[in-house]
Every structure is written in C-alpha cells, then in structure tokens.
Image (cartoon, helix red, strand yellow):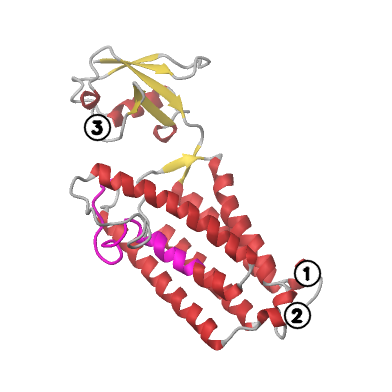
Amino acid sequence: MKLTITPRSPKSRSFPITLDFVGNPADVTVDQVQAAIAKKLPKYYPDRQRLTVEKTALESGKTLADYGLKDGDSVAFKDLGPQISWRTVFLIEYGGPLVLHPLVYYLPKLFYGQAFEHSWMQTVTYWMVMLHFLKREYETVFVHRFSHGTMPFRNVFKNSAHYHLLSGLNLAYWVYGPWNAAGTKLAERSDALVYGCIALYIFAELSNFHTHVTLRNLRPPGTRVRKIPRGYGFDLVSCPNYFFETLSWLAVSVLTLSWSAHLFFVVAVGQMYIWAVKKHKGYRKEFSDYPRGRKSMFPFIA
C-alpha cells in the first residue's frame, strides 16, 4: 500500500513524501511508518515525529487500520525538534540541588562573606534535601520505567529551573545563611519539632519509594503497558507518590520556617496536584473499572 506523508508546516522542503509498504493497512504499524520516514530522512528519527490524522495522534503499536487509513491516504507530519530522554532530563533536574546545596553549605565565605558554625536545624535540613535528591537519582536510574521515551530538548531548561533555582539555590541560600547559624534566635527549635519533622520525612520518603516500585512493577521492561495501580497508598488516591512527596517537603518547610522553603512547597505541591488531576482523569477514561472512590492526590479531599 501507499501512504503520503504531508507536512504540518507549509514551509517544509522535505515533504510531502510517499511511502510504499507490503500488505494492507491492518498489516502496517505506526512504528513501521515512523521507521520508513527516518530511513528516508534520518534527521527525523521516530521520537522526533508526530503523525496525525484529522488531529488524532497516531500511537506506537497500533496499525493504520486502527485509524481508518486506506491505500493512498495521507498522514500529517510534525517535527517535534531535537529530543532528549526523560531519564537524562531527570538526572539533570535532580543533579542541580545535589551540586548547589553542598556549595552553599560548605562554602559560606563564598556566599555570605563569613565563616560560621551551622545550627542543628541547618544540618538536618541539608541532609533531608541531599537524601531526597539522591533517592530521586537512584530511582531515575534503577526504578522508573518511562511511558514516554523523550521530550523536546528545549524544555530541559524550563524544567530544570524549578529544581535548580527554587529547591536549589534559593532554598540553600536562605536556609544555610548566618541568620540561622548556631546560637542565633532564628535557629532555635525544640527537640520535639526536629524529631517530629525527621520522623515525618522518613515515613514520607520510604512511602514515596514504595509507590514508585509499585508503579515500576506494573510495566514490563521495554513496554508501555498501563494497568490500574493498587495497594499501599493507591487505594485512597491515584497518585500517592505525589502525596507522600508533599509530606516530605512539608517536613522541610516546618523545620526551616523559611519563606524559601514555603515558596518551593507551594509551587511544587501545586504542580504535582495539576499532574495528579491529569493522571486521575486519564485513569478513569482508560479503565472502565477504575475505583470510583479514589481521589487524585489528597486522601478523602481531592
């Protein structure tokens, strides 16, 4: 069969092109079409392609017949631009705080023009942040299985700014400053408050890790299979990983009592809630038997 690939952009000089395939539409997959485009035009590797029919995106693993395409029909092509793997994106995002926090914490003369002894609050906060992002890096390499392989390279700068600036430089600078140093009034915390925040943090981080492992086990390696997650946390909300991460940053926010921690907490929780609502709606749309009692992110609330 023949399939014509037309450009979304009228300025394109590479398209239209016509591809020939052996068999009928039920035999030809979207993956084969993308591979054929990449063979003709190596610049446009599959992850860089977006193919649509009347604004409906063609998905990997499906056949042309699934979209009602016949011999001689056309498919629209859009160039998504240079791509970068999500795994690399996550490593870059979480790497920022892992570099910035030690710099600010261990080089106070460079950032504040003076040396001083850190308070207990500052030290506990430092290790909370470092362990959180070390865990995230570990999960990125050894736990997460991504449903989408890549994202546009240009977005890495926008995505990284959230972590490098808000939870990185801004949080580190205002928490580790001399105004919170040992012996200062601002650094005084009761043992109950410190140990309470540590306990909440440990519970939240371990619970968050548990939910990530649950999500990993739902998807066999090398597939994009989606199933209904069940078990610890998932019986109450669709995205318990976001809820438990909220508790982790709540512990940091309460411990530091810093506006920079509060700011990151509000921004991070707001963003995670947006993601959770989107995923919750996706689950309910995809699975007819999805549990109706679940909320998006906050148990019994929303």
Q: Give the amino acid at mark 3.
A: Lys
Name the residue furthest front.
Answer: 301
Q: Which residue is mark 1?
A: 112
Q: Residue at x 29, y 61 (%)?
A: 234
| In-front residue for pair 257/28 | 257
Q: Which residue is mark 3?
A: 62
Report the magenta residues as a range.
Answer: 223-249
Q: Is residue 115 left or right of residue 191?
A: right
Against 31, residue 229 (above or below) is below
**Tag 3, which secondary structure?**
loop
Per the model, the C-alpha gap separating discs 1 and 2 is 10 Å
Against 97, residue 128 (above or below) is below
Q: Is residue 62 left or right of residue 212?
A: left
Per the model, the C-alpha gap separating discs 3 and 2 is 62 Å
Q: Quarter-wise, where is residue 293 in the image?
A: bottom left
**Tag 1, which secondary structure?**
helix
Q: Residues within 10 Å of mark 2 (few under 14, many from 20)?
A: few
Residue 65: tell me if it is visible.
yes
Q: Is residue 291 left or right of residue 247?
A: left
Q: Give the amino acid at mark 1.
A: Tyr
Against 177, residue 279 (above or below) is above
Q: Which percent across, then down, holds residue 37?
A: 38, 24
Q: Which residue is mark 2?
A: 116
Q: Which percent across, then down, holds residue 68?
A: 22, 21
Which image quadrant: the N terminus? top left
Q: Nearer the viewer, mark 3 or mark 1?
A: 1
Q: Give the amino acid at mark 2.
A: Phe
Q: Residues within 10 Å of mark 3 (few under 14, many from 20)?
A: some
Helix, strand or loop for the magenta stretch, by majority: loop
Q: Quarter-wise, where is residue 302 in the image?
A: bottom left
Q: Residue 75 has which mark? A: none
Q: Which percent across, then down, holds residue 6?
A: 40, 16
